[in-house]
Image (tube, coloured by chain):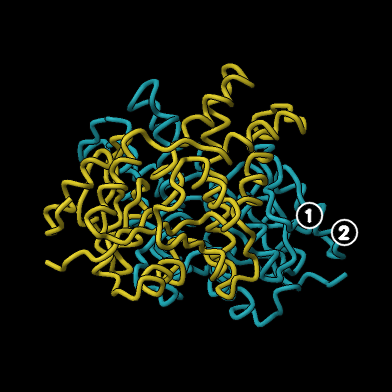
Chain colours: A cyan, B yellow
Amino acid sequence: MQKIRAVVFDAYGTLFDVYSVTARAEQLFPGKGEALALLWRERQIDYTRIRSMAAPDGAYYKPFWALTVDALRYAAERLQLLLDPALEAQLLKEYACLSAFPENLGALKRLRAAGLPLGILSNGNPQMLDISVKSAGMHGLFDHVLSVDAVRMYKTAPEAYALGPKAFGVPAGEILFVSSNGWDACGATWYGYTTFWINRAGHPAERLDVSPSGTGHDMNDLLEFVRTQGAAV
Amino acid sequence: MQKIRAVVFDAYGTLFDVYSVTARAEQLFPGKGEALALLWRERQIDYTRIRSMAAPDGAYYKPFWALTVDALRYAAERLQLLLDPALEAQLLKEYACLSAFPENLGALKRLRAAGLPLGILSNGNPQMLDISVKSAGMHGLFDHVLSVDAVRMYKTAPEAYALGPKAFGVPAGEILFVSSNGWDACGATWYGYTTFWINRAGHPAERLDVSPSGTGHDMNDLLEFVRTQGAAV
């Protein structure tokens, strides 16, 4: 088995807990908040894919924060919710300033203490990632905060996944890529990373004819997996 | 305004009414059928995109029918529905043998009578399209039944949309591309087609910074649009 020489994390839903967005949406639109948050997230990801697929040269690329605004407006309109600028600002602010999942900070520190360089590889654009990292109290923990903005192609494009090996100077197979999105863990596996799917929601495996190298429920399970790869964490 | 010299249709949801699938799902899983049909459709499209994006050379391409089976199994597992082979076969058979929307046959015949060559450009693989066309009583109406299977890239990839102009020998701008999927109408507009979005569900426009050339509620509205383009239908 290849020795892991760095760990790279997806950001939204993996490091940062997006649940507070749903809670705020429910507070602002009682009975409709969960539907709003779901459709918002769905369109946010759809728009990354539709735009990346339509132009391999990134011609229809738009930064993730702008897509996040587009997707929120679409979702509100479709659900016939009146999203005035003040309400929109509240929801977007919630998205900008997310919390970390409770076990994450401790787990990241243990990985660092074991001598593993850490990184983020996210669809998020650099400014939004910068705010999120600080907001979650993770400032200074990462050697590289990588955004697909550098290549104008969203995951699962190989150009996006290529950012990790390039930044760390390590082959993909010796980098552990961690995501709570099943499709992202699969995409990274295709690319050649060693991968770990944090299946927080207990969903079934995506039927994409590829399996992440490891799967668990939270970041503590990730530490256990890293130990099986020979690291002393 | 460019004169329309051919009309190309998306298939599933545009020509073929997929509602019967939801009805059958609801019959087989009372109270859960709509959720099953929605998640099935969502994952079906997700898988086309995840696979196409991950490999511009089509390395992770899998035919649409196989993805449709994968997506159904995922959706049933996630909703904790016991999908035994007999139930699965019933749902898949429903998907294979769809009806046409009621006004479609008449509208297609009027377009043909006006001298417009017609085509299909679908994510569906050729065998599945062949069965669907016959099942919906549309055999013989189309000059070209085009499947993205020929290029192993799903819409919104330019390779997929390129099939239309290539088959008809007409520039994209002189072909009217018709879809009931907003994202598909947007993708075709980016590619350069004249486009019409049949917004049957009355959804808001996708926020993709591009607008179809025309929009309407059904195929009769499409005929009206074609008249504005100078064709006598």
Q: CA distance from mark 2 to mark 1?
A: 10 Å
Q: Amino acid at mark 1?
A: Gly
Q: Is residue A219 visible?
A: yes
**Nearer to me, B89 or A184:** B89
Query: From the image, which quarter does the C terminus of chain A lie in?
Result: bottom right
**Nearer to me, B220 or A47:** B220
Q: Residue at the far top: name it.
A: B30
| Residue on which the image places disc 1 | A214
Above/below status of B230 relative to B132:
below
* Spot occupied by residue B21 in the image (x, y as percentages of width and height): 54, 31
Q: Amino acid at mark 2?
A: Thr
Q: Residue at x 42, y 70 (%)?
A: B158
* Spot occupied by residue B153 in the image (x, y as percentages of width and height): 53, 66
**Nearer to me, B39 or B175:** B175
Chain of the residue that carries numbered disc 1 in the rendered image: A
| Residue on which the image places disc 2 | A228
Q: Is residue A76 visible?
A: no
Q: Residue at x 80, y 59 (%)?
A: A226
Q: Secondary structure at mark 2?
A: helix
* Spot occupied by residue B116 in the image (x, y as percentages of width and height): 26, 60
Q: Are marks 2 and 1 in contact (CB under 8 Å)?
A: yes
